[in-house]
Amino acid sequence: MWFERAVTKSGAVPGLPPATGPGAVPTVREAGKSAPSGPLSEQRRILESKLQPAVLATLDCFRKSGNAGASCANVRSGRVAIEVWLRRDSPAVRAQLQALGFALTRGGGARMVAGTLRVEKLEQLAQLSAVEFVALERG
């Protein structure tokens, strides 16, 4: 195609100086690069797939705050009120939730439980294979 011939092997357009600086547009080669992979990005992908954006924002705020989350929305005494949607519900799954410190407030349904959890335990909660999705508790 015409645009493939207009770009050199380095990804730059012939006859134009290379773009540099904060407002620079990436070259064709740079634009094709993927995000770095590894344990951190994989962990973040899991969090983003299982935590409602508002829950993820609460976790991020908690991590960044120097006051144990006191300034973060949805955090009360270091805990967050959540609904946990399960792939399956069983006494073993309930025991896993309890081991994390999940304080059950209501059963909600066959696969949903509501309760409170320490904010720093949200990441461990998302790692449980029985957990499908976590959302802020609805009034």
Image (cartoon, rainbow, N blue to C red):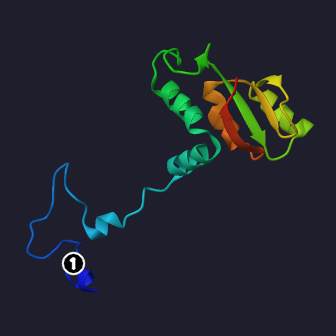
Extreme residue in the front direction: 139
Left or right of 83? Residue 6 is left
| Figure check: 11 above or below 94 | below
Task: Between residue 4 and residue 67, name the one nearer to us.
Answer: 4
| Figure check: 67 above or below 131 | above
Q: Quadrant of residue 84?
A: top right
Left or right of 35? Residue 42 is right
| Residue at figure coordinates x 86%, y 35% from the top left | 109
Task: Between residue 34 and residue 134, name the one nearer to us.
Answer: 134
Q: Amino acid at mark 1?
A: Val
Within 10 Å of disc 1 (Cα), the crowding (few <14, some 14-19, many 20+) is some
Quickly name the residue at label 1. 7
Residue 110 image offset from top left, x and y in percent? 88, 39
Image quarter in which the C terminus is found: top right
Residue 70 image offset from top left, x and y in percent? 52, 14
Extreme residue in the right direction: 91
Left or right of 16? Residue 35 is right
| Residue at figure coordinates x 22%, y 59% from the top left | 25
| Figure check: 83 above or below 126 | above
Residue 59 image offset from top left, x and y in percent? 55, 30
Left or right of 17? Residue 41 is right
Task: Between residue 83 and residue 59, name the one nearer to us.
Answer: 83
Residue 13 image offset from top left, x and y in percent? 16, 73
Image quarter in which the N terminus is found: bottom left
The number of numbered badges drawn on the structure is: 1
| Residue at figure coordinates x 48%, y 56% from the top left | 37
| Figure check: 116 above or below 87 | above
| Residue at figure coordinates x 61%, y 15% from the top left | 76
Under tag 1, what secondary structure?
Answer: loop
